[in-house]
Amino acid sequence: MVGTLASDYPAWKKLQEVYDNEHKNLVLKDLFAADPERFAKFHREYTASSNPANTILLDFSKNLITEPILATLLQLIRESGLEQVRDSMFKGEHINTSEDRAVLHVALRSFGELDTTEAGVSEVLPVLQHIREFSDAVRSGAWTGYTGKPIRAIVNIGIGGSDLGPVMVTEALKPYAKRDLTPYFVSNVDGTHIAETVRDLDPETTLFIIASKTFTTQETITNAESARDWFLKTAGDKKHVAKHFVALSTNEKAVTAFGIAKENMFGFWDWVGGRYSLWSAIGLSIALVIGYERFEELLKGARDMDKHFLETPLENNLPVLLAAVGLWYNDFYGSQTLALLPYDQYLHKFADYFQQGDMESNGKFVTKAGQRVDYQTGPIIWGAAGTNGQHSFYQLVHQGTKLIPADFIAPTTTHNPLRGSLHHRILLSNFFAQPEALAFGKTEEQVRKEVGPNATEALIKSKVFEGNRPSNSIIFPLLTPSALGSLIALYEHKIFTQGVVWGINSFDQMGVELGKVLAKNILAQLGKPEDVVGHDSSTTGLIHYYQKYRKE
Ligand SMILES: O=P(O)(O)OC[C@H]1O[C@H](O)[C@@H](O)[C@@H](O)[C@@H]1O
């Protein structure tokens, strides 16, 4: 409820008590030994309502919870008013209070079924139709560049929410990609990014997609101007820009001022947050790469998870369950991070994507009512595709001093069944083994047996795995567009649920503003040392060093 700190809810106080009194006794090995039904009790299977082939199994039995603890976590979520706020979101009420906006990314994938009067929602289907026509034309070769050649490269220029979603999804759905249409993504304002990207591209067959909700983002506009310069160096005449530049934006005025024709603009609305925008026109590069029909399957997979989130009792609601166990570690065990560990190379950008998705949404210390929270909010999100992480940072996850909850994610079937799926069996044996090793570890007694009588005490100690390290396992049949849509929406709603409990606004991003303002001021002072005024000695010293050694 707005105006209530999470720590004031009765269930929060109860959880604190339970943690203080019981957490030392919450030992996974014992919990499993005591209850042969533990997996049965702590897993749920989701089936997408419009696609029975799209199922997801969430196994949360390897968490430091009991049935009463789970019930109390769900009670906390209930007391926070999750169900009411969720319903308000789906109705289009302005739950983004600081910006007085609706939060309706769910409308982008509802195919006209959402009951809301919010302006713009009725334009969702026409924009999808525009995406369909344009992507069909480019893919079929009907849309050509200024010399009549078909498009072979698309370069999405955008940053943050206008980059990370399309990057993650085009990587994840590569098996469905049109192989003679290659996507590139330019985000960083570092000139290296655009320079290295266009170096080997042919202006006659390259399409630039300028993706920016506001169309004022410094990085994106600077990169877009440089791309236009590069293109015009070959094309010459400005009229050719129309065939090679399209825009995805809410800001028509700025788009046309840039020189992009109105009919080549794909619109969206202020109720689409950047980090929730891959379902909107921002997904154009996805539709170009995998085709419009597949893009629609992605949206429908998300729509099915929306329905699940909306209609399923909290006890069986996947996003809510993920949120519940996450709250337990974040707010009572004091864990700082959550590792996202997909055992699927196609999902190698998944953690990067949800770094913005989660950290920009829930990295807030003030509630919607303006109070300073007295508890931890959003976790630090990080991770890498398995098995690479195992040979890098898992040492610390297994034997370090920090509690690192982790989500293991994998498909049962691979798109690349090399050598009779040998690779995939090896991959999945690791997907099964790592959570097992984390949970159950290896005792000193086991180590002693293995190393024999001559081993030193120090060696024995170094080989012990304490275990009791929690994780979720998420497994589904195949990484299809529909499965990916459901998986992304699962995490979106988990983030939403946690934000509601913490009482924060998950849909603004005030924290990105200050740095932008300071950089603008500094940019104007970079010319001469005497212009560098108004800073602390450290910032001044750094800028002076730059001015001394730079070469233009
Ligand atoms: O699409 P735009 O307007 O260029 O914004 C790009 C990004 O800018 C900022 O970092 C934030 O507001 C992000 O949420 C956003 O995704």
Image: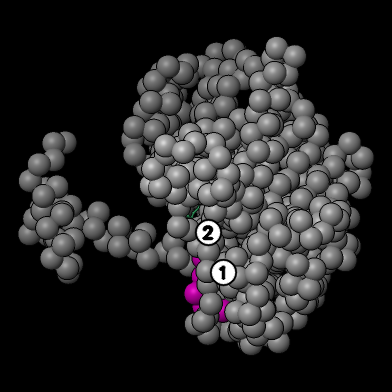
Q: Nearer the viewer, residue 201 or 381?
A: 381
Residue 267 pos. (x, y %): 66, 48
Helix, strand or loop status at disc 2: loop
Q: Is residue 125 above or below residue 494?
A: above
Residue 302 appears in view = no
Quadrant where the N terminus lies? Answer: bottom right
Q: Amino acid at mark 1?
A: Tyr
Residue 366 located within the stretch drawn in magenta: yes
- Kindly state the secondary structure of the residue where label 1 is placed: helix
Q: Nearer the viewer, residue 170 or 16?
A: 16
Q: Horizontal placement of 361 versus 63: left or right?
A: left
- As drawn, is 53 to the left or to the right of 292? right
Question: In the image, what residue occupies the spot 65% across and 38% down?
Answer: 433
Tell me the residue that label 2 is attached to.
403
**Over which residues does the magenta segment extend?**
363-368
Query: Is 85 rendered above or below residue 435?
Result: below
Residues tagged 2 and 1 counted as in contact (Cβ below 8 A)? yes
Classified by dominant secondary structure, the portion drawn in magenta counts as loop
- Residue 128 horizontal/vertical position (percent): 76, 41
- What residue would you read off at disc 1? 333
- Cβ of mark 1 under 8 Å from ligand 1: the answer is no
Whole-percent x, y for residue 37 in the image: 86, 56
Q: Nearer the viewer, residue 251 or 292?
A: 292
Please report whichever mark, 2 or 1, sits nearer to the chain's N-terminal start.
Answer: 1
Residue 543 — which label?
A: none
Q: From the viewer's side, name the closer residue of 479 and 173.
A: 479
**Image quadrant of residue 4?**
bottom right
